[in-house]
Image (cartoon, rainbow, N blue to C red):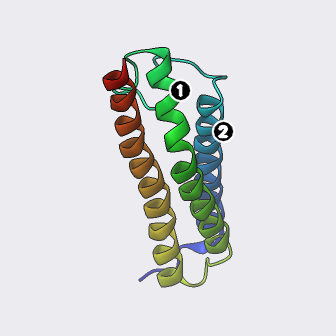
Amino acid sequence: MENPGYTVTVVLSLVMVVAAAVTAIVAVRTADGRIGRNEFAGIRMTSTRASDEAWLAAHQAARRPTLQGCAISGVLALAFAPLGENPVGFVVLLALSVLALSTGVGYGAWVAIRAAREVARAS
């Protein structure tokens, strides 16, 4: 496997850190109501967009798993930044960083949809 070099690892590390940070900011702001139903940010499923109550309940439920995935992803991304001379370590940590962010967001969306459906059932 070819050496990716420090420039590549640092740039990809920054991309992952920014992705995790932006995702975390959106998760917090949707969970506390600062970002309401919209076309651009948040968990935009039919059930979560059914009402303002469903939107808020969904994002409050998704907050914790999403933030956990973001934190783990960010730490792993910072860990692979200096691995320009170690291609295997770089690829493994990059994959784990992407997996952590994807898992946190995916599980967060799953619990969000369940919470939104509960709001719909209670109405």
User: Where residue 42 appears, x then y in whole percent?
Assistant: 50, 30
The residue positioned 48% from the left and 62% from the top of the image is: 100
Residue 41 seen anywhere in this rendered image of the structure: no
Q: Residue beneath label 1, please? A: 56
Image quarter of residue 23: top right
Query: Of residues 107 and 98, which is closer to you in this image?
Result: 107
User: Mark 2 or mark 1, which has the lower sequence index?
Assistant: 2
In the rendered structure, the answer to whether residue 102 lies left or right of residue 93 reads left
Could you tell me the amino acid type at mark 1?
Answer: Leu
Q: Report the quarter where the N terminus lies.
A: bottom left
Quadrant in which the C terminus appears: top left
In terms of depth relative to the viewer, which is nearer, 75 or 68? 68
Q: Looking at this view, is 59 or 83 the one in front?
A: 59
Q: Name the residue under label 2.
A: 25
Q: In which quarter of the image is residue 49?
A: top left
Relative to 29, is 86 above or below?
below
Q: Which of 54 and 20 lies nearest the eye of the viewer?
A: 54
Residue 74 x/y as whole percent: 63, 60
Determine the secondary structure under disc 1: helix
Q: Residue at x 44, y 23 (%)?
A: 54
Tell me residue 63's x, y (percent). Answer: 56, 43
Question: Alpha-carbon distance for marks 2 and 1?
Answer: 15 Å
**Residue 77 in view of the camera:** yes
